[in-house]
Image: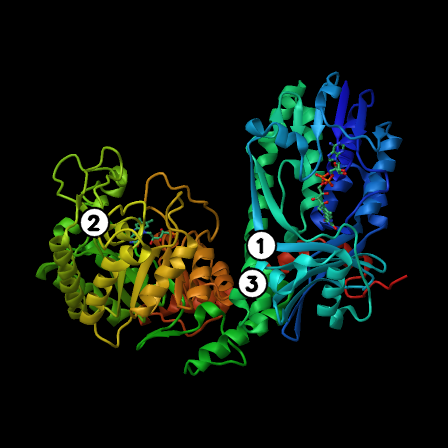
Amino acid sequence: MKIAIIGGGPAGLYASILLAKQKPKAEITVYERNRADDTFGFGVVFSDATLDNFEKYDPQSYRRITQEFAYWDDIAVHFRGTVHRVGGNGFCGCSRRNLLLILQERARELGVNLRFETEIDDESRLNDADLVILADGINSRFRERYIDHFEPEVDIRSNYFAWMGSSRPLDAFTFIFQETEWGPFIAHAYQYEAGRSTWIFETDPETFENAGLKGLNERQSADRMAEIFGWFLGGHQLLTNRSMWRNFPMIRSKRWVKNNMVLLGDAKATAHFSIGSGTKLAMEDAIALAEAMERAPTIAAALQLYEQGRREEVEKTQHAADVSLVWFEHVDRFWDFDPVQFAFGVMTRSKAITYDNLKLRAPDFVAEVDKAFAKQVRAKGFEIDVARPLAPMFQPMRLREMQIANRAVVSPMCMYSAKEGVPTDFHLVHYGSRAIGGAGLIFTEMTCVGRDARITPGCAGLWNDEQEATWKRIVDFVHANSAAKFALQLGHAGRKGATKLMWDGMDRPLEEGGWDVISASPIPYFPDSQVPREMDRAAMDQVRAAFVAATERGERCGFDMLELHCAHGYLLASFISPLTNKRSDQYGGSLTNRLRFPLEVFEATRAAWPKHKPMSVRISATDWAEGGITGDDAVLVARAFAEAGVDLVDVSTGQTVRDGQPVYGRMFQTPFSDQVRNEARVATMCVGNITTSDQVNTILAAGRADLVALGRPHLVDSAFTLKAAAWYGAEGVFCPPQYLPGKEQIFRNSVRDRQDLEELKIKAKPKTRAELKGEATKPLAAE
Ligand SMILES: Cc1cc2nc3c(=O)[nH]c(=O)nc-3n(C[C@H](O)[C@H](O)[C@H](O)COP(=O)(O)OP(=O)(O)OC[C@H]3O[C@@H](n4cnc5c(N)ncnc54)[C@H](O)[C@@H]3O)c2cc1C
Ligand SMILES: Cc1cc2nc3c(=O)[nH]c(=O)nc-3n(C[C@H](O)[C@H](O)[C@H](O)COP(=O)(O)O)c2cc1C
């Protein structure tokens, strides 16, 4: 078998090693355009988990690589004169040059033919090869040549970065966030061998321009960085080696295989340097390819197996890298944060590390985070313990005169169980039990402002006396038997009205018994849905009056808070999104025009709602669809409502059009809450696939939302908050006297369960290489 590999970087060389071991008779050639020792870049970084993988697949190269390594356990965050260190991270650094020399040596030993200074510009030269591995790096010529087949998507990010080196020793993976007269600069730095560290500098385009970096050569820009970070470099030089400032290209390819050619490493996909995974991904690609070659009967089958098996892992890493790079691109959002909260945000930015996880590894750090959070709450006038604070989830909050005992919220959820809009006993039990379960705030389902405003025949309403009396009974029960505050969500279905109950076909039109539907524009939801009537001014007046009447009824019921539903493609949302609003009058076109009617309804309801009670608005912060609302628009929408007097923006997403493409995942909508909160400077509630109290605390402590709503988790666990309170020892959580023995038991058991689990986790955690070498806290001396 003949194998040709284009590119002698980590992907190409490691693939040659693994394939040579597996197929000793194969003729394997690596073509590399550079000289053998002509490599650029400084250090590369691997996690302990990646090294375990290397050990398994080629112990010989693993041993040589790890002899040269620098190990560290801590991440250090420098910000506004403070430094916060968090241990237990288990990373290793090594020089890229040494890594490549070791891989070259190992490949030679295994009989691989290494052809340096050989540039391949036409793969037809390799026609006699059975397998051609395209490991030609980020600017892959062959990926571009077959662009129509591989369909790469190249997203050039806005921030500028440059790789440099230094002799400054470091004992931690170090992030430095530096204020300058031009704007913020960030250094990502780590040691990779004695007396050598990698320094990646990053900044936004405006700061790059202001600092005059555009016109400087490599040496001059290194000098500029040395001036900025001189206080930390302490006289150590910054070294350059092709250290040009660039923009990071996030690359994803739709296909990785063409006939007998396969893309490997950076050529197929990249991951942002802030999670240090470029070289790791490249070498793990080689492992995946070698495994597929071992298992599949033919080369064609192996290449398919490689792509199928590897894609999910690569996409997961890329997603984590994306979330991380977006955090760094928007670092100015957090610039005025308390430094410890800022450091917590750095640590938890890509979701892998959480509040509970950090509490286990760095209890003092988390205690400081809790204190900073509690201080902010105390500054708002709450008499709370700052010396021994509760976890953020159990800190109170005030909106106007409404006080909420904790930050957990039952999200609005339609029960589709009302009769002609009148809630039933089901609703009494449903809301009653969730209120008793301890959440600080519970929302009603979308409660419709008129018979024709309903989504389905089972939707609850508030347009007549019978409904008002029934809701009042539920509100009274909640107030009499719990500490929860109760918010009424008012809405109008718009074009999604006259549809079936959720369990009969979500959003599908009713076959009989429907009613006329209205919307901003006459566009049906499904092609076979009813075509809505475009609202004229008279219809707007009627709808506004219906919202006001329902608001007045809501006040008579005794609700504590009011939410206007402007999300999920319902009537008011249909005005906001350009995908559903095609009007040419003053209610269509610009965002200002599209917001005109929803704001008018907000202002009318605000005027009808008592001044001392808060109001929120639920928005879809993105339509997840081309040409629709984006996070940037959501900031403008939130600002407009905030100027009109909204107290909280409830940040949801999507459900505007049926072909939206949401990117689901844990806490997937939280980045939008983060953006709205920290750019529009308005209180937010986030929601969406948040399932644990650990996630709730992570979000709150990082300042990504002020309240956290959970929908589906509350459907199956009405006592979610009470259980979390037991876990975090928040004794003050409300529990009705009837249930006190249960509360006492769970609080008692939780202390033990928590200790057992933590001990188990500590025991089960393998020692990091830094711990094993006893180098966890010692800086490596320069030679
Ligand atoms: C300037 C620079 C500095 C970097 N520094 C670091 C760092 O310090 N730490 C870190 O973790 N990561 C660093 N990276 C990123 C990291 O190197 C990559 O993620 C990783 O090397 C990917 O491995 P690869 O084998 O896929 O690609 P590469 O390492 O880019 O290797 C591709 C190889 O293919 C060769 N090649 C390309 N086209 C041809 C052709 N037509 N014919 C023959 N040969 C060809 C190139 O010369 C190159 O050696 C750096 C990247 C660059 C560009
Ligand atoms: C059964 C069900 C009904 C829902 N009804 C509403 C509703 O009436 N109003 C609303 O704004 N959101 C509604 N939602 C959306 C939820 O409030 C929440 O945003 C969504 O379920 C995501 O949160 P989760 O992952 O915690 O469930 C509903 C969700 C579910 C599962």
Residue 556: x, y in percent?
15, 70
**Residues at circles 1 and 2 in contact by the CB criterion of under 8 Å:** no
Badge 3, how many Cα within 10 Å: few under 14, some, many 20+? some
Labels 1, 2: front one: 1
Identify the image's colour scheme: rainbow, by chain, secondary structure or one colour: rainbow
Give the numbered dot on residue 26: none
Q: Amino acid at mark 2?
A: Ser
Labels 2, 3: front one: 3
Badge 2, how many Cα within 10 Å: few under 14, some, many 20+? some
Dot 2 or dot 3: first in sequence order is 3
At x 53%, y 67%, the residue is: 334
Secondary structure of the residue carrying numbered label 2: loop
Give the numbered dot on residue 417: 2
Q: Amino acid at mark 1?
A: Ser
What residue is disc 1 on? Answer: 324
View extreme (top): residue? 128
At x 43%, y 51%, the residue is: 689
Q: Quadrant of residue 38?
A: top right
Count the numbered circles shown: 3
Q: Is residue 367 left or right of residue 730?
A: right
Residue 162: x, y in percent?
70, 55
Q: Nearer the viewer, residue 329 or 69?
A: 329
Relative to 299, does residue 210 appear above or below in the rendering? below
